[in-house]
Image (cartoon, helix red, strand yellow):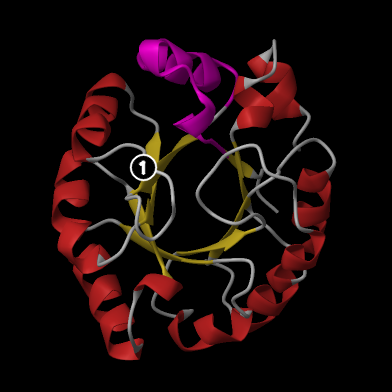
Amino acid sequence: MEKIIISPSILSADFANLSAEINAVKSAGAKWIHVDVMDGHFVPNITIGVPVVKSLRKATDLVLDTHLMIENPLKYIEPFAKAGSDILTFHFEACENEKEIEEVIKVIKSYGIKAGISIKPKTEPEVLFPFLDKIDLVLIMTVEPGFGGQEFMHECALKIPKIKEKSGEELIIQVDGGINNLTSKICTSLGAASLVAGSYIFGHEDYKKAIDSLY
């Protein structure tokens, strides 16, 4: 298996020094940057939007792994794709039906970038089975989306092998929520190929030690 992809979540970074923070995690071994977009509707928090993604694109050549925790994702694909996102992950729960999900995937792919679908802790993994051959990434939330620093929900990790069993080798299974040096091993042992970590990395004195401890 290839090395696990660590995607530090800038939700926990120092926003006054964002460029420096990104360079620091890049030097520490990160290949992706996880960008949490929240609209205050789909989740109770409000974070960053298109202008920040555009600025990040100018500041780094790392993969911008953009997680849309927003209502009506179809409306925002174009601006986030044009701003420089390499991956756009939207929520299954933000779509009304299968037809809308397929349309969102199709539009994301039309910009030549990767498409991902995320599910909240209470959503069963089986709902994603019809779409696994159409997407590049599944993001399993192991906390309720909306805020950083929450505790890992162990039962959510059991979704990983269910998705893996039904998907091809190319699909990236990513896990976000409460990831640290212990929970990371649970997820990777079950088949996760990418880990999102925010407070664990950016709250650590040594970003390299933090990232290395996740493998």
Q: Check residue 19 for magenta coloring.
A: yes
Image coordinates of residue 77 in percent, x first then y, are 21, 58
Image coordinates of residue 103 in percent, x first then y, are 23, 79
Residue marked by disc 1: 46
Image coordinates of residue 188 in percent, x first then y, are 76, 53
Q: Quadrant of the C terminus?
A: top right
Residue at x 76%, y 55% (from the top left corner): 187
Residue at x 25%, y 30% (from the top left corner): 52
Give the vertical position of 24 relative to 58 (above or below).
above
Residue 82 falls left or right of residue 214: left
Q: Nearer the viewer, residue 179 or 112?
A: 179
Image coordinates of residue 105 in percent, x first then y, are 30, 72
Q: Quadrant of the N terminus?
A: bottom right
Residue 125 falls left or right of residue 52: right
Q: Nearer the viewer, residue 124 or 22?
A: 124
Q: Which residues are magenta?
A: 7-29
Q: At label 1, which amino acid type do we have?
A: Ile
